[in-house]
Image (cartoon, rainbow, N blue to C red):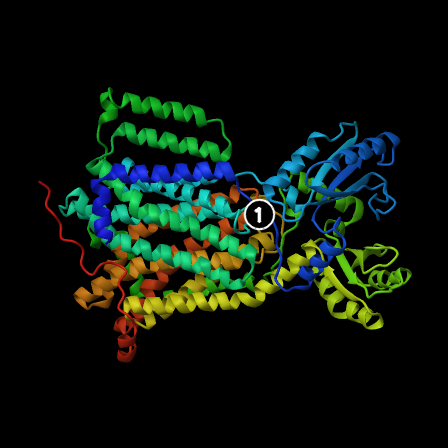
Amino acid sequence: MLSRLGRSAATHPRRFAAAWLVAVAALVATLLAVGPAFTTNITAPESESTRGLAVLAAEFPAAGGEPATIVFAAEQGVTDPAVEAAIRSFLGSVRNVDGVVNVIDPYSPTSARQISPGGTIAYARLVLDADITTEEGAAIRDEIAAIAPSLDGLEIAYGGDVFRDRRPPSSETLGLAFAMAVLIFAFGSVLAMGLPIATALAGVGTGVLATALMSNLIEMPDFAATIGVMIGLGVGIDYALFIVTRYQEFRKRGSAVPEAVAAALETAGRAVLFAGVTVVVSLLGMLLMGITFVTGLAIAASTTVLATMVASITLLPALVGWFGDRIAVTRRGGLIAALLVAVALVGVALDLPVLRLALVLALAVMALSRVWGPLTAVVTISNEAPVEETASYRWSRFVQRRAATITVVGSVLLATVALPLASIQLGFADAGNDPEGTTTRLAYDLLEEGFGSGANGPLFVVATLPAGTDPTGLGTISAALGGVDGVAAVSPPFPNDPAAPTAALIEVVPETSPQSEATARLVHRLRDDVIPTIEADSRVEIMVTGPVAANLDFSDYLAARIWWFYGAVLTLSFVFLMAVFRSVLVPLKAVGMNLLAIGAAYGIVVAVFQWGWGGTLLGISPGPIEPFIPMMMFAIVFGLSMDYEVFLLSRIREEYGARRDNSSAVADGLAATARVITAAALIMVFVFGSFLLEDTRTVKILGLGLAAAVALDATVVRMLLVPATMELLGDRNWWIPRGLDVVLPPMAVEAAEAPAPTSVG
């Protein structure tokens, strides 16, 4: 089937290219008409915070939407008549902004502690429509900022997750620039380099457009598309690299272009399908969590991977057939132009003033390449050496001679790097980790300065009251909450109906910041020790809710269920590898080594983002690790590492089947695949690592974690542990009980026999 698809695409490339253009145009037109609908809603099902939010929305409509703040700082004092008049007038206009449900200004009689003791800082509480999208939130923020007063000495900042600045990513261009350089040297051709880039961009673009459309149907966080871009670029370029490499091998054997494309798809294309499906299945395994937020992330990332996989087996063969033998030739002018384009991409990522100059020079070089002799000269970029003369072959032999020592050293190294994982703190980082200069960071800092860290994340205590409750007796609840260690301030109870209340709302301000472990302990102390005592002495039901409590419940819920996800992915991977390689020890070893590599990547993430090692260089402050990050990393990295595992082991298995010499099979298999695996890993490491330049902390964490995991997998695992452990096991690598061999279905990642070469001419 794949060979027919490849032959058809290579023979009729314009049809396939036109089909892709039509599909992309249709997605763009639909998205322009409908628009995206990303949200920031994070709740855990069947949790106390979720039940409390439901009561809040039903009994206190003016307080049950999306919270936000407007913070004011005035040197002359916020009670200065001119300042107070300007703020009151401004907030009066804010009430009329579409999407604003309620505004509690600091001068209102019902406001509680909204002017700092020093009198220089104040804040207004805003309640926006529930389930507001990030685009709508940004529009409301901009509309409010446009009507803000301009008064000497008055500073205004906007706080709340819904007001966070979410700029589209640009750092992926840095990864593309590096990928261009790696691909040129991997293929020895500029045009061959362009095919994987074009294919990856087409797949990623399609996936992101589809993700934006699906955000109208499925709840997705605003950074879901950015994660899709990150993963899609890495896997898209890698998949195309594998296929084009195999195409070049078949062309060198004498196959005609359509037949070489068909053979490449029947071999490497099958491996790409396996790799893509593995990543998609790993990502969709997160649906086991049963949380809409996580479901949205899983679908967004898997959609982009699926789109890049489809582009690799449809658009890429068409492009290869279109350009034919021209992809094997590189002229000096084309090489210079490609390098100038890479410089332009670096300029975009780093915001350097070289973009226009580099593009103009690239166009000039391309134009001169047609008329100026020195630029038309063919250049040779790289030459392939015999397998036995490669550094990879010699390295494998070196490792095999010291297999036991290297196995121990490599395992201990990964285990040591993974040690910080033992102290991981799962939670959501607060706005104190936002980049300096952003309005949410300024609002956070001003609130902390004026009211203490806890003012950035108050807890909402909701009490449901039986009929006939005397509202004057509710003060005892506030008094009991105010005496708890870790509580900075408690508001008086606010009943929903002063005459006949059925619910009451109390605000509890912690002494510590929203992301602090002390705040999490306070929530647990209130729920486990304090509130049960209050409930026993009265006839009320009390729930701790609000964004901080919701984030904590989300983290606890995810931590309790994540082991089901890990178990499902590991089991499926182990069974699949057994079926492919007809072995018990090879998949067991592969799963174990992948776990070591992922654990080490977790350790690096904890050391940098939680402990703060090197945080100054990356522009981050220490904070907890978002609870979905380990799960996302596991799904992505396990899928990608299985890709490399199968690509390498299938070649080793092929060599072993031909010679029945395990040592030679490992050395030859490693040497034959090292070049393409190294190139693929380098590209992925740099593409993922480039996202460290983004402002969003979540994207930074994923970028570093994925880059570290791929780097460790391609070096310590592939270069040390694989050849060493396979040498130690010898022929036992391929042992499988006869009964199990019969039960397992026959599977092959690549075709058992590639199509026979067809001579040219």
Q: Mark 1 points at which residue?
A: 697
Q: Which residue lies furthest to the left in this view?
A: 761
Type of amino acid at the residue the image marks with label 1: Arg
- Towards the viewer: 746 or 523: 746
Q: Quadrant of the C terminus?
A: top left
- Towards the viewer: 486 or 289: 289
Q: Where is residue 151 shown, x and y percent of the image? A: 78, 27
The quadrant holding residue 486 is bottom right
Q: Residue drawn at (48%, 39%), measured in percent from left and top?
A: 31
Q: In which quarter of the image is the N terminus?
A: bottom left
Residue 236 appearing in the image: yes
Q: Residue drawn at (80%, 67%), measured in percent from left and top?
A: 540
Instruction: Specify few, some or many for label 1: CA neighbours under 10 Å numbering under 14, 14-19, or 20 or more.
Output: many
Q: Which residue lies furthest to the top in this view?
A: 371
Does 218 sit above or below residue 469? above
Q: Where is residue 596 shown, x and y percent of the image? A: 45, 64
